Image (spheres, grey):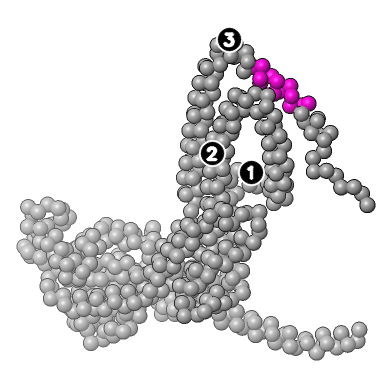
Amino acid sequence: MKKPLPAVDPLRLLVAILLLLPVLALMGFGIFWLWQSGNLLYWLIAMVVCGILGYGLQQLLVRQERQLLMNTTTDPNPDWPPSADAVWQQVEALAASCNPEDWPLEDGRWISELGQKSMEAVAHCYHPEVEKPLYELTVPHTLLIIERASRELRRDIAEKIPFSNRLTVGDLFRIQRWKTKAEKAFNVYRAGSILINPVNALLSEAWRHLRERSFDQARNELHRWFLRAYVCKVGYYAIDLYSGRLPLGDDDHTESATPESRADLEQTGQATASAVEPLRILVLGRSNSGKSSLINALFGELKTATDILTGTTQALEPFVLSREGFTQALVFDSPGCDSPFFDSKQMLIAAGSADLILWVSPANRPDRQVERQFLDALRSYQAARMDRRSAPLLVAVSFVDRLRPANEWQPPYDLTHTTNIKSANITAAVRAVAADLAVPAEQVIPVCLLENKIYNVDDTLWAAILNHQDEALRIRLMRCLDAKKRAEDWVMLRRQMAGAGRFLRDLPEMLGKRGDK
């Protein structure tokens, strides 16, 4: 049996001492010369000043790195339903509680354990009555959460951490092993320097303490950010999943029309195999308020029947709207909310499937109780649906040309110019409609929809619609994800049943081949 090598080879230790001795002697003689020449005090002052400046600059770098890392934090998805807000707070609280000391990176268990904690925090919020809510996840969706969280974390590390694309996992472990050996050798050097030159050793120890404190702080900041980023990434996609918005596919969910929109497009005669999902704009209001006239004004040509008879529009009627700078949309005309053809339940369902709602209210009709009643019902319906964001609402105040003085109509009108009677009355009508319908005044736009007298549609109203286009597109995306998720369940079931059928069909042949062997 071979004799084990000693922990410290005396010959190697002698070689190290012989190599370090000239350097230590030079440092000692240098201190002695400074003392003899009377420059030792100046050298000490210069060393202290340089140390303070270096420490200050190191702290500045730490703050800059902290700010850089803060800018790469995961933010909640604005498209999430309101019910996800409280869940995200739980994820952030878990991320803030992660300490580097509890989760060393060299211990690979942190990946699974910390990811499991994050998913459990989300699962418990969605299934509080279940003892082990994490078991409510399917295996493919669990793998999908880890895959997407790891993909985004990989991108952040590659872009923000220097040399992360060059260092391998093996390099990190080798650095950790060499760190222990280097610390032992450095401790020998520190002991020798104290014996040879105590003054220089004390100053070196003070400088080393400041330097290590700064470096350790920067390292801990990076470690803490890494843990928090991982928790937030996993929690982000777990919320996506539990809120029903994480299909297994990676395709663009708006590149094809949903079954509902495809049926509406077929009704208009413009359905094609390559049709993308349009925005769904619902026009509501009372009878004879100008809903059909507003749609005509939006199109710039006659698209709907306008009549003085009550209840001209008797059902939801779709029209395809295409304008430059605006996503293709389906605009739905509807019966008046005071019409016998108006089905409140059907309209609430239609509003729940809309991406943008335009409400038309006549300026010359102060009796807005029926309008307020339905809008309150709509707001209650939207508030009860915690799984979806509410579609933005814009109010078009029609018939402003009939306000006093009725014979005057010389647009455009400056609504901030209160000395003009017409402008003042239009402004007052806008404020009254906003108050009566409980809608913010900035979402109420006065318009005139008379033929050859179209006013404030192509400028102010279209500007408001374009201003809400991004919000409407986000709602469209969430609506498409819901439809995709429902369709995906049936597609996956058909594939699984087909795969199981092929397996059962081939099973006798497979067993026969094994028997022959």
Left or right, 386 with reference to 337? right
Mark identifier at residue 60: none
Q: Quadrant of residue 116?
A: bottom right
- Ranked by sequence position, the earlier of labels 2 and 1 is 1
Q: Residue at x 49, y 68 (%)?
A: 121
Of circles 2 and 1, the one toward us is 2
Residue 220 seen in render: yes
Chain part drawn in magenta: 18-30
> Residue 250, position in %: x, y?
57, 66
- Ranked by sequence position, the earlier of labels 3 and 1 is 3
Identify residue for label 2.
214
Left or right, 457 with reference to 136? left
Between 44 and 191, which is closer to the camera in this rendering?
Answer: 191
- Using the numbered discs, state the Cα–Cα distance from disc 3 to disc 1 in whole angstroms: 46 Å
Q: Secondary structure at mark 3?
A: helix
Mark identifier at residue 37: 3
What amino acid type should be assigned to the residue bearing mark 1? Phe
Q: Secondary structure at mark 2?
A: helix
Magenta-drawn stretch, dominant element (helix, strand or loop): helix
Label 3 with label 2: CB-CB less than 8 Å: no
Q: Is residue 316 above or below residue 42?
A: below
